Image (cartoon, grey):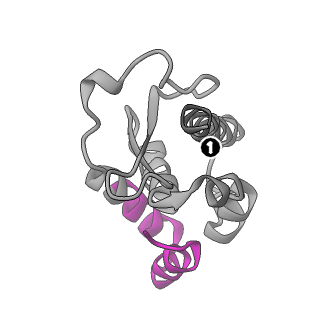
């Protein structure tokens, strides 16, 4: 469970955008495989040019914490997805609701390097993550 500060620190160690891009794609490659049975229509991100799936579940050791699985068919967005999953997994619903996509974009300098269509897709990923967390909260209530 990394903080945004940790991730920013790693990015800042890299020189230019090309090195950061390679690191981003490497993060995507390291994303644990998402079970095929979770790649459903409900878990598919709408509004993203890439095929992206994300699924939330309660942490097996602590039901107050949420874990995420995810997958994507493009390397750049899969890397961004890996960052979002790292930032959200292991946190509470309240902490996940506070996840600020604009801060992530700004601190990692993604505004300058991702197309506007990609921005929309990333916002859609985070919104689906938050919707799923709200759904889990209703199940417990």
Instruction: Please tell me which residue is depicted at 28% across the width and 51% down the height of the picture.
Output: 29
Question: In the rendered view, does 4 fall on the left or right side of 58?
Answer: right
Q: Residues within 10 Å of mark 1 (few under 14, many from 20)?
A: many
Q: Is residue 80 above or below residue 43?
A: below
Q: Quadrant of residue 112?
A: bottom right
Q: Farthest residue in the top direction?
A: 41
Q: Quadrant of residue 78?
A: top left
Residue 97 percent coordinates (x, y): 69, 52
Q: Residue 26 or 39: which is nearer the viewer?
A: 39
Residue 18 percent coordinates (x, y): 46, 64
Q: Is residue 5 above or below residue 28?
A: below
Give the residues drawn in magenta, as a range.
1-25
Quarter of the image for the C terminus: give it: top right
Q: Residue 139 or 107: which is nearer the viewer?
A: 139
Residue under label 1, please give it: 126
Q: Is residue 70 magenta?
A: no
Quarter of the image for the N terminus: give it: bottom left
Residue 6 percent coordinates (x, y): 50, 79
Q: Is residue 22 magenta?
A: yes
């Amino acid at each position: 469970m990394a903080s945004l500060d940790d991730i920013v620190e790693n990015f800042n160690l890299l020189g230019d955008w090309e090195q950061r891009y390679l690191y981003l794609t490497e993060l995507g490659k390291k994303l644990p495989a998402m079970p095929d049975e979770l790649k459903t229509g409900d878990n598919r991100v709408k509004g993203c040019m890439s095929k992206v799936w994300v699924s939330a579940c309660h942490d097996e050791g602590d039901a107050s914490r949420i874990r995420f699985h995810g997958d994507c068919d493009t390397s750049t967005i899969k890397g961004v997805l890996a960052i979002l999953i790292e930032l959200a997994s292991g946190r509470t619903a309240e902490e996940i609701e506070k996840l600020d996509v604009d801060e992530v974009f700004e601190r990692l300098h993604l505004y300058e390097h991702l197309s506007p269509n990609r921005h929309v897709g990333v916002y859609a990923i985070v919104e689906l993550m938050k919707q799923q967390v709200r759904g889990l909260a209703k199940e417990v209530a």
